[in-house]
Amino acid sequence: MADMPTDFWSGWIATLTIVSFIGLAWFVFSIYFSDDGEPEATDPPVWDEDLHEGSNPAPMWWFWLILALMVFSVIYMMLYPGLGSYAGALKWSQGGRLIDSFADYESEFGGIRKLVAEGQLNTLREDASLVTSAERIFDRNCAACHGYDAAGQAANFPDLTDADWQWGGTPEQIEQSIRGGRKAAMVGWAAVLGDKGVVQMADYVKKLGRGGADGHPAQSQYNQFCIACHGADGGGNAVLGAPNLIDDVWLYGNDDAALRHTIANGRTGEMPAFGERLDDTQIRLLVMLLSRDANGP
């Protein structure tokens, strides 16, 4: 429709409107004022023994009602859009109304939006109304996965109340996660390690940072396949979204079965992007709510 000739369709709509209006006027006139010249039957037909066909005209109040509506329609089309591209005497449009609404919104809330955009996070947290607004945004957009308490759920959605963030927990990193989303890229190693290797690697990961990892049978394979993402000490890499393997935070569980499944099959969890769903102020409020850096920008 975007590449269709605007003038043609505008003229077509205007023509249909005018022809329909003239047709209605002719129909009303023919009902109330035309005389077909035929003499009225002296003996009207009788149906079903006692149902007589009459020739009573439509009541006049119908005529006045239709006439009033037609006059209203003419006035309306003179004032507002209704005849193709004709804008009407009042120049009203949906787009103009939307622009006015945005202007009113900016006039009423522009100050507080600027405060949110430029204020220090620790200062914003002191405003109870802003915290309440942030919680409402979280409840509508984030709680379905992370829970209303933000503690995560179902061993698939991370806890947002701790200090362990797979892609980093600074205000900038949190904003990037919210705005652009995240997608895990942990590949499965079953084909490379084999069943025995998967079992050994799970045992090695559990011992990383806890003693007993040096000289482990899976150490060489870890250095060959895993060190590039998780680091030599298993501390992870927030840039790559490679989680820390030496703390006590495990999204998918740290029991033998869960670790073996992760190593063998990989993980492909996804955090959807909210950059087009939430505006800058809403994202800033979420960063304020979730960030642990009281001295953040």
Image (cartoon, rainbow, N blue to C red):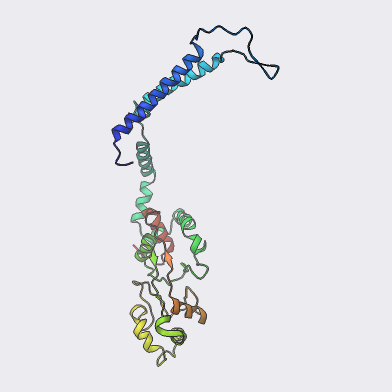
- Between 42 and 156, the residue placed more toward the observer is 42
69 over 258 or under it: above or below: above
2 over 271 or under it: above or below: above
- Between 210 and 84, the residue placed more toward the observer is 84
Confirm whether residue 209 shows in the render: no
271 over 243 or under it: above or below: above
* Rendered location of residue 262, percent (x, y): 45, 77
Report whether 145 appears left or right of 103. Answer: right
Confirm whether residue 60 shows in the render: yes
Q: Where is residue 184, by image quadrant?
A: bottom left
Residue at 35 percent across and 57 percent down: it is 119
* Rendered location of residue 52, percent (x, y): 66, 15
Residue at 40 percent across and 91 percent down: it is 214
* Rendered location of residue 285, percent (x, y): 41, 57
84 over 103 or under it: above or below: above
Q: In the rendered view of the protein, which quadrant contains the N terminus?
A: top left
* Rendered location of residue 187, percent (x, y): 39, 75
Total labels: the figure holds 0
Q: Where is residue 82, by image quadrant?
A: top left
Q: Residue furthest right?
A: 49
- Between 198 and 230, the residue placed more toward the observer is 198
Q: In the rendered view of the protein, which quadrant contains the C terminus?
A: bottom left
Q: Where is residue 266, by image quadrant?
A: bottom left
Residue at 35 percent across and 40 percent down: it is 99
